[in-house]
Structure formats: C-alpha cells, structure tokens
Image: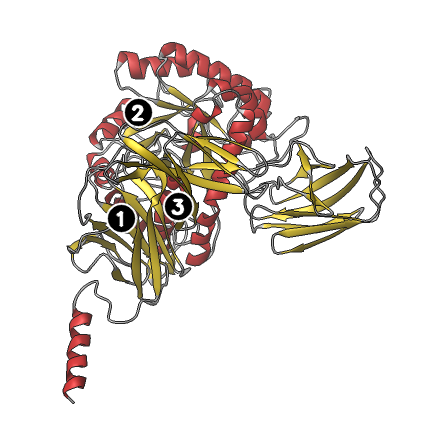
Amino acid sequence: MARRRLLLVIALVAACLPGVAAAAPDATVVVNAKAALATVPDTAIGVNHAIWDGQLGTNAVNDLLGDAGVRMMRYPGGSYGDIYHWKDHTAPGGYVAPNTDFDTFMAGVRRAQAQPIIIANYGTGTPQEAADWVHYANVTKGYGVKYWEIGNELYGNGHYGANWEADNHPDKSPAGYARETVAFAQAMKAADPTIKVGAVLTTPANWPDAIVGTGDASSWNQTVLSIAGPHVDFVIVHWYPGGSTTAQSLASADQVPDMMYLLRRQITQYAGPDADRLGIAMTEMNATYGRNTQPGALFAAEAYTSLLENGVFTVDWWNVHNGATKASTVAGQPDFDDFGLLSSGTCLENGPCEPALNTPFAPYHALKMLSLFASPGDQLVRAGSGDPAIRAHAARRPNGDLSVLLLNSDENNSRTVAIDYAGYTPSASAPTVHTFTNGATGVTTSTDGSATTRTLPPLSLTTLVLHPSHPARLPAAPGKPSASTTDRTATIAWPSVPGAVKYEIHRQLGTTSEQWGETPGTSFTAANLDPGSRYTVNVLARDAAGALSWASPPLTVTTGSPAQSTCTVRLSNVTDWASGWVGNVEITNGGTQPIADWTLNFTWPTGLQQVSSGWNATWAQSGKTVTVTGSARIEPNATVSTGFVGAYTGPNIQPSAFTLNGTLCHTAS
C-alpha cells in the first residue's frame, strides 16, 4: 500500500511540473552538432509588402514585423513590381494605396531594423528607370539598398501559355528576358556597383520548370543562367506547395533538400565561371492548408528552417496583409484562407469577419518563434526524429548555447520526446523554453524541465535554449571545403586553421556522422564510394589540447561514372511537362565483342520518380531501382536506343550511374 501511494505521488508531481514527462518517450530526437548545415544570414526571415496595402507605412505594422524578427522586406509587391513606376508612384491597371511610396516604405524598413529587397520594373519599365531608382535610393538618399530583383515571375508572361505577369517586351522568351536582364544589371550597377542583382528562375518540380517552350532551345532556367548568370549575383524562386492536411503540408518541405540541390546543380552547370557566388532567394512562399491557423504556423517554421538549412539567404512570406478568401474551421480555430501574416479586418460577403485589423495570424507567431530559435551568425546543425509527427531543427550559437526547435504535428495528442546530443553536452540547468500552442495568441517563455526530455503539446512549436556543460575555448572552424571526384573517390580540401594539429572529416548520415578519417594536412581522399551517389561532409579542427572546433560549412559532392568503360550510356530528356517526361536512353557497346541479351540497371536519386511505361526494351521498377532488359544485339561501337515515360512529384534529378550486365558504364552528357 505504501509503495502504491509513493507511485501515485510521483505521478502527480510529474503531471504538475511543466516539461516533465510522466511516461516513456514516444520518440527520440537526435541533435548532431558535428553535422553543420548553413549559417543563418542577416536576411533570413523576410516578408512581402505591397503598395496596395494601406498599412504598409504604419508604425503599428512595422513594429509588429520588427518584434517578430523580420529582417528582410520585399517591395512593391509581387506582380505589381512589373507595373510599378517609382518616380510618380503609379501602377497602371492596379490600385495604389495612399502613403505607400518608396520613401515611406524605407522609413518602415528602418523602423523594423530590416533590409529591403526591391523589384525593379522589368515588365513595363526600362533599364534606365531601374538605374535611376538605384541612384535615388543609394546615392541621393543613402538608403544602402543592396538587393534588387529584375522583375517578378516573368515565366508567367504568356510564353508558356499562362499569362498573369505584365511584360511589354516583344520577345517574351527566356532568352529575351535573359538578354534584357543583362542590360538592367549593367545599367543598375553603373549607378551603384555595390548592389546585388537577382534574376528570376523557376523552382525545380514546379511549373514551368524543365519545359522547353515553342521556339526555345532549352528550359527557362538553363537559358536564363547561361545568358544572364555571369552578370547577376543571385537567383529568385517562389514556392506555394500543396497539401490538404497538416501532414501533407509539412511533407512538402521534405523536398527542399533535393529542390535546392537540383537548383544549385543548374547554377553550377549553366551560370558560367565562379557560379557558386550566386545566392538563392525564396522571395515568395505561403502554405496551402490552414493559412491563418496552426497548420500554417507549423508549415512556416518547417519551410523556413529547411530552406535556410539548405543555403537560401532569405525566405519572404507572402504577404503582410492580403484579405479573407473563405471561412472555415481548421484544427478547431477560425481560418479565412488569408495569405496575410496580419488580419486585414475584412468581412466575407454574407459571411464572418476576420479579427480586428493587424491581429497576428498563427504564421506570424511562427516567425517570432524562428527569431527566438536562431539569430544571424548561428550555425544550423542536423537534427531529426524517428516519429513522423515530430520534426526537429537545431542551431549552435557563437556564445556556446544550443537551441532546439521541436514541432508536434499531431492535432490531438501530446508527444513526449527524449533528446540525445552528439558533439554537444548541455548543462544540467533547466533550459529556457519558448512555446506556441494551437489557438494561442502569442509565444510563452519559461525556464523549466531538462535538456533531455520534453512533452510537446498537440500541434505546437517548442524551442529549448541550452547552455553548454563546460564552456571551452575552441579552435576556429575550417572554412568551406572544396572537392574533386571520380566514380569512386572524393578528394576534399579546406583552408588551414591556426593552432589545429589535425582535422577530422565527417560524412552526414541523417542525424548521425560517419568519420571518414583524420589528417594533419588540409586535404583528404575518401575511397570506395558508390558511383553516382551524393555525400555531404564537414571538416572539424582539433587543437593540441584535444578541443574540437565547430564544423565547417557543409560540402555536398556527387560521384560520377568511370572516365572509360566498355559501355557508354546517355540519358536525355526529350520533352517535359513539369510532372512527367519522356526520356531516351542510348547504350553504346565500347567493347570488342557483341552483346546479345542485356540488362541495364540504374537507381533514381529520389523516391518520387517513377517509370510509367517504356519501349524497345522491357522496363521494370522496384523501389528506386530500375531494370531495363533488351534483346536487340549491340555490335562493337554500335548504339541501341530505348525510351520511357517517367513521372515525378518532386525534383527530377537525373541518375548518373548505369550498369550494363553488371559493368559500370561511362555516363555521357
């Protein structure tokens, strides 16, 4: 009886203490401080401001944005950028609200302690008009506007059929846009050589990515990068993923690593010398499900962090205000399908009204949570969970602290998580805890619980801020590595670190790290790698006292195919419609003997690619592995062709390794 009373007391105490788990954990979160991702830039959290928004210049709005940690503001607002004339503050064909001119906008930017990103009018403007704007902003007024976009979504000018973007140029092809972008960039940089100019691209796996228009030689991205790439400083993409549930909405963010990998590969391949200098800006993004409620907040937190982890330098939510579209109840809360972060205070016809003007919607609080989670200069590191309902992110701070962002997407149940740490030992003191729960009107902050376990409320965001157990002076982290690859090796090099006696090379494997080796030098060759495979590595420095540095910036390398082989395979994209494509495969026998029956094998880089049908051979797919069997005799130095229809629902990354009857072939471009 005494034992039963003791157990009851323990259970009651545990239930009453915030953040203390009363049951076994539902999942384990792993935080790996050795597996570094990108560093948070000072432009990370951004929003769109539009000249049709009468609240644009108000102190109330700009104070709200500043309080949420917004550090980038985009102007004059999406497609309005291609009809807006800054000198007389007009937008023919559109509504311009009072007190939304450029100087008013800049006053709000400064009040919020943010930076501007400006859309130069490509659609109905000229290079000279844009150059005059740069001169006025940075020479006349001294605003120091660094980032300038050349138009907005110009692929929507009718060239591919859909026509929503104003474009008065007679040549509406990607080549026409690219050539004019060069003229814009040259004129604008003549006014201020320090600015950075961005060109519009399509987002991988989103229309019209990979489509080759009538009369074009290649897709929008390939064309624009090939012509304008050497003349610009960053590229612009937009993303409005689908999903009709919280789980589907969050799952769309799982495509971000492949999406950014493919975009970066396109930049490297087509943008000319020193293409790695081009940054990537996500200047429009929003949720589809629960735009004003907690599912939208969870999507915002997941999408911003995923994009920043993959090197995007700003993510700009569309929009500050937008207006109600339809009323519904999502996760028990009223939702108005409003793209705005803040309520417009409008009413639907014969329907309910939004909250009072400027009332923050749930995604606003997600942005505030993100600013509490990671600040400019923090190093994002790998974190994850084995429970699909739990998502995790982490950031290492220059002062030695570590923050962990936890998302519970279960709408009905709390989830208790155990948290394991690699490369970091938190102190035993209670962490600072920031929490945003379903239906809450703000983020709450407390100090309670431990660093190793936490109970997450249903449909919630939680950030733990931890201190190190033993603060120590660490060697500097190595700079970003570079690499050269073959089909089975990767040689990695990095800048030396003063005081380092050796370096460790770690490969990221999900939330764990695999140490490839260590060396006192500044290069290392990893052997026995799989051909056509992607590897992400970090380098860490260790000093004579045994202290281990932060990790270097990540480096992703992809092994290729042998330079020479008895077979060669060429895969080409015949036609593409942004969700499916026709591929052609040419197989060349480079040996001295004919090949009668043959089997070709390859593996898709993602799990969202599928062969639908094929011809001139038998096509089959199991998981990500494709097997092609043919009976057409291949004579020495002869080539046979086979083709297929493929489907994809994510980035369509091409395989780069093929085996023919077990022999690894050379892959031709």
Which amino acid type is shown beneath numbered disc 3?
Ala
Residue 505 coordinates in the image, percent (x, y):
40, 39
Q: CA distance from mark 3 to mark 2?
A: 31 Å
Q: Nearer the viewer, mark 2 or mark 1?
A: 1
Which residue is rendered at x = 60% and y = 25% of the image? Answer: 173
Task: Give 622 or 222, whichever is nearer the viewer.
Answer: 622
Q: Earlier in the sequence, mark 2 or mark 1?
A: 2
Q: CA distance from mark 3 to mark 1?
A: 25 Å
Q: Earlier in the sequence, mark 3 or mark 1?
A: 3
Residue behind mark 3: 303
Residue behind mark 2: 101
Which residue is rendered at x = 26% and y = 61% of the image? Answer: 453
Relative to 608, 124 lies left or right: left
Task: Give 381 or 186, whichever is nearer the viewer.
Answer: 381
Which amino acid type is shown beneath numbered disc 2?
Asp
- Residue 179 in sight here: yes
Q: Nearer the viewer, mark 3 or mark 2?
A: 3
Residue behind mark 1: 424
Q: Nearer the viewer, mark 3 or mark 1?
A: 1
Which residue is rendered at x = 18% and y = 64% of the image? Answer: 18
Residue 153 coordinates in the image, percent (x, y):
49, 31
Residue 483 coordinates in the image, percent (x, y):
48, 31
Whether pointer 3 and pointer 1 mark residues with C-beta atoms closer than 8 Å, the reply is no
Vertical position of residue 324 compared to residue 171: above or below:
below
